[in-house]
Amino acid sequence: METQKTDSFADRLTQQVGRFNVSGRTLLVPDMAPIGSRLLAASFRAFGMPAQVLPTYTHLHLGKEFSSGKECFPYQVTLGDILGFLKEEKKRLGEAFNVKNYVYFMPESDGPCRFGMYNKVQRLVLDRFPEFKDMPILYLSSADGYASTGILPSDQAKLFRRLAYVTMILADVLDRITWRVRPYEKEPGQTDAFMAKALDDMIALIEKRGRARDFSALYGLLGQIATQAKMIIDPTRPRKPRIGIVGEIYVRVHPDSNQNIIRELERFGAEVVNASLGEWVNYVAFEQYRNIQKDWRQAWQRKDVKALVDVTRAWVDSRIEMTWQDWRQNQVYQKTLEHLDIQGDYTIATVEEMLDNERLFTFDIGTEAALSIGGALEYVHDHFDGVVNVFPFTCMPGAVTSAILKPLLLKMNVPYLDASYDGAIQPNREVALRTFMYQAAQRKAARQDVASGQASPPPH
Ligand code: SF4
């Protein structure tokens, strides 16, 4: 009797989680940062890959139902999003539904964190549904700087990665324009309406000019957006206390997951800046560069000439890529700063230097904790009036960040708040935010008194 062979989990991972040619299928992109995800999907479309952003947070109950409770909150949110989409799509299309028409995009990181396992564990869950098991999961990994080799022909892969990088920085800057303008708008709702139209215009331009990497056209539109956004500001309104957000990347940029913390802080009188998306990608490139330096030292000790040649080549490539990223990032920020004084972004090298000099943390430990701790210190350096650390409940780097930042910022007299999320509504959240904003307003007033000579600076 013939027995039917079932694929092992290892087989499923090799065949159904990887880098596939996605031609002819719709790429499903999770909704993380509202602007960033939409510009990324537009970049895919510019290269001929039909891509759409998944609806989000409508099926969180499914994410919770099909997880054990030990997973991170972003895992549950993204799992709920993909299961909810497929179920709704099946209902909508009926007999015409074919899961093979879709590819699910779930990147990963090659670090000590659980994010490296999301796509594998989500594969396990999708395999429990016979009607969904044939949908592959496509990933890009931090291990090779999110290279898109394998999903696009090799001559296109590098060009796509570069477009995706620039559009991510554009997304950061569009967010920063919103946060700079909205707290001072002349009419309530003006900024949101204007930025929604600006986003549509940017998406259309990326789809049209992205493949040709016509960055001048994208910068031109960005300049117009910044100029017009500035006109929304009521110049008679005094500047508000500035609050910097650091933390775990998914929850801090996904408004539903963080219960709209930016709007809530604005409601209580803040001007907010969130850490950028570019920070993570620049950090990944920086980490690769550090690893290459380590490999070079080891090859030198072994006197391994062949390895030295290979590593030197990798070192040059890595250096070129980092320089290119720096150059493009500066261009995008400069284009906006010509019209509007948004908050700039720091370089990863300065964060590392600051952490090292103060002996606060080391990049050798990895994870986003290094960025969150360093980012918070950058905010303090730039005279922000408070720092909020946003992270999923039980997030390991989030807890490390909290353990270091809380006593440190207390000593520096900078208001600090931990905001952890797992989907539950905490009844005391509003009180915590209001109290924090009261402290931030006090700090701003004290700083102004010192600046005007009415008070002396606090002792260090
Ligand atoms: S950073 Fe936090 S939430 Fe993200 S995978 Fe790691 S532990 Fe989970």
Image (spheres, helix red, strand yellow):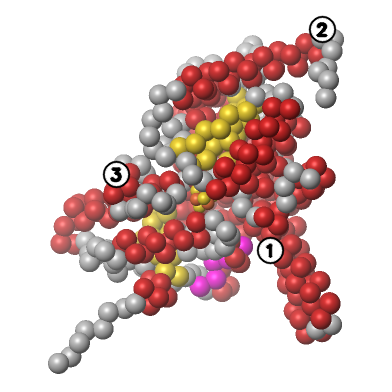
Q: Quadrant of the N terminus?
A: bottom left
**Which residue, given by chain and number where applicable, does mark 1 sit on?**
288
The answer to whether residue 260 is magenta is no
Q: In x, y percent, where is residue 16?
A: 38, 71
Q: Please give the range of residues in magenta.
A: 145-150
Q: Secondary structure at mark 1?
A: helix
Q: For the point 72% across and 23% down, which residue is it?
A: 413
Horizontal side, residue 15 vs residue 183: left or right: left
How would you rate the neighbour count of disc 1 (Cα within 10 Å): few for under 14, some for 14-19, many for 20 or more? many
Q: Kindly indicate whether the residue at mark 1 contacts the one at mark 3 (C-beta within 8 angstroms).
A: no
Q: How many marks?
A: 3
Q: CA distance from mark 1 to mark 2?
A: 49 Å
Q: In x, y percent, where is residue 99?
A: 27, 64
Is any atom of residue 276 visible in this view?
no
Instruction: Name the mark on residue 61.
Output: 3
**Which residue, given by chain and number where applicable, does mark 2 sit on?**
454
Q: Secondary structure at mark 2?
A: loop
